Image (cartoon, grey):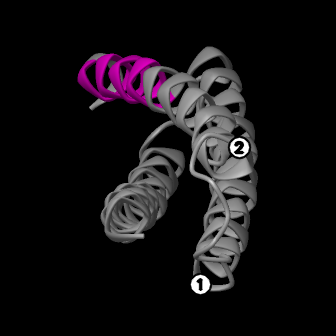
């Protein structure tokens, strides 16, 4: 039982860390949105505005993905809090983290790719 408590504690720590990171990324997307609104006021070049609209759409998609991942994190925490301490770790609980972990890894890669593209765009137009 002690091993299970330690395992669940580690799993909860990972999920809490991911939730903090997702909330930070959500805030970061708001900051990027503000910067895009600043560009709209400065430029009327159609190519600049087309790229800007693409980034605005990608920000909306990213915020939606963050929302879904946060929801999944909350559900995982609820599952951990309701865990049966007599259940064997080798079963459901061991696989509890795997899909979310893989999805977080993919999301983080995509987030930083978007962030780099936006930073390059800002350098180009500001």
Return the x and y of residue 79 as percentages of the image width and height.
Answer: 70, 73
Q: Which residues are magenta?
A: 111-123
Q: Which mark is residue 81?
A: 1
Q: How many marks?
A: 2
Report the mark closest to the observer, 2 or 1.
2
Q: Relative to 76, say whether 122 is above or below.
A: above
Position above or below: 65 against 68: above
Q: Position of residue 91 (x, y in %)?
A: 71, 43
Residue drawn at point x = 58 percent, y = 27 percent: 102
Q: CA distance from mark 2 to mark 1?
A: 17 Å
- Rendered residue at 42%/70% (across/down): 1
Dot 1: element: helix
Rendered residue at 64%/52% (across/down): 93
Indicate yes or no whether the magenta region holds residue 33: no
Q: Which residue is mark 2?
A: 91
Depth check, front residue: 94 or 63 = 94
User: Does the image show residue 60?
Assistant: no
């Amino acid at each position: 039982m002690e091993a299970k408590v330690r395992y669940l504690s580690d799993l909860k720590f990972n999920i809490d860390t991911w939730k903090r990171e997702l909330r930070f990324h959500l805030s970061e997307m708001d900051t990027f949105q503000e910067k895009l609104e600043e560009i709209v006021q400065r430029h009327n070049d159609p190519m600049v505005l087309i790229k800007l609209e693409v980034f605005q759409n990608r920000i909306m998609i990213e915020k939606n993905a963050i929302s879904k991942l946060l929801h999944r994190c909350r559900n995982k925490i609820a599952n951990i809090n309701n865990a049966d301490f007599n259940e064997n770790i080798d079963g459901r609980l061991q696989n509890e983290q795997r899909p979310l972990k893989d999805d977080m890894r993919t999301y983080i890669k995509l987030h930083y790719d978007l962030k780099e593209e936006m930073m390059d765009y800002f350098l180009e137009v500001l």
